[in-house]
Amino acid sequence: LVSRELHPHDSLVAVGGASFGGNRFGLIAGPCAVETEDQLLASAQAAKAAGARVLRAGAYKPRTSPYAFQGHGPEALELLAQVGRAVGLPVVTEVIESGDVELVARHADALQVGARNMQNFALLKAVGAAGKPVILKRGMSARIEDLLLAAEYVLAAGNDQLILCERGIRTFETATRNTLDLAAVPVLKAKTHLPVIVDPSHGTGRRDLVAPMALAAAAAGADGLMVEVHVDPPTALSDGPQSLYPDQMIALGKQLGAVLGVL
Ligand code: PEP
Ligand code: MN
């Protein structure tokens, strides 16, 4: 179902009024996590000012350490929906358990399956049946073929509104948090009709590398980006070091416009 052989034309996936795929490029931006109303609103305003078409923020955070901030859960879902309406952007947020899919789907315009859950097959089937667009992130140790087979689970469950996301993989390199595999973009686009976006924030783990990798992703043919922005990164409860400051987010939005304009 994901193969381009049987479905040669690019699929277009809509999240609220934003479109991904074909020649439609979409910017998704927002903080790693919903922290407070003020934090989320100010970060969302920066995302909007940068040209983002979808607001992102986590309510359930799949953290490597059980002692790290786990997200504010249901309250955060309410806040995200409210701030999305306030700034006029559809929202995407991660779901980490099949049992939460219905609740998250009631609050979000799209469901994110994170890298750590790329092969949580029960979750893939559940989001496949949820009737909302899905953003599926590549597992940190997943081959491109594994990502495509994970996507196949969602389509096989009846949901073809799926966006793939390259977010970096584990390699021997330690200069960056993950190794962003930009070659995955043209490889995926040759193999599948599904839209492919890139997350340069988790892909590098470093604020200074987010803009160059975002621009490179656009030049490589990505159908969109997911970028973390925080109103005050040093105080962020998660992923502060890779979160753009609002002015950097707005500058990146302008640079993206220029790059996409010449492509
Ligand atoms: C996220 O988008 O905040 C996230 C946890 O990403 P990943 O699943 O790619 O680590
Ligand atoms: Mn994050």
Image (spheres, rainbow, N blue to C red):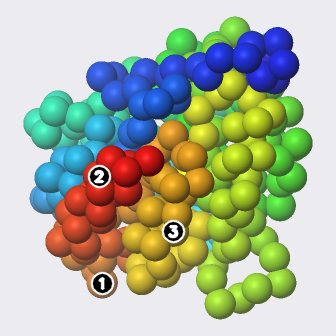
**What percent of the width, then of the height, locates residue 46?**
18, 58
Identified by mark 1, the residue type is: Pro
Label 1 to label 3, Cα distance in Å? Answer: 22 Å
In the depicted structure, whether residue 93 falls above or below residue 61: above
Is label 1 or label 2 in front? 2
Is label 1 or label 3 in front? 3
In the depicted structure, whether residue 75 falls above or below residue 125: below
* Quadrant, the N terminus: top right
Q: Looking at the image, tell me whether mark 1 or mark 3 is earlier in sequence order.
A: 3
Residue marked by disc 2 = 257
Residue, x 88% and y 42% (percent of image)?
Answer: 145
Q: Quadrant of residue 231?
A: bottom left
Q: Secondary structure at mark 3?
A: helix
Q: Badge 3, how many Cα within 10 Å: few under 14, some, many 20+?
A: some
Residue, x 30% and y 77% (percent of image)?
Answer: 233
Most foreground residue, 73 or 80:
80
Label 1 to label 2, Cα distance in Å? Answer: 28 Å
Residue 213, disc: 3
Q: Badge 1, how many Cα within 10 Å: few under 14, some, many 20+?
A: few
Q: Looking at the image, tell me whether mark 1 or mark 2 is earlier in sequence order.
A: 1
Residue, x 48% and y 78% (percent of image)?
Answer: 209
The answer to whether residue 63 is visible is yes
Residue, x 66% and y 67% (percent of image)?
Answer: 180
Is residue 140 left or right of 10 when viewed as pictured? right
Is residue 157 left or right of 53 when viewed as pictured? right
Label 3 to label 2, Cα distance in Å? Answer: 15 Å
The answer to whether residue 40 is visible is no
Q: Quadrant of residue 91?
A: top left
Is disc 1 in contact with disc 2, using a CB cutoff of under 8 Å? no
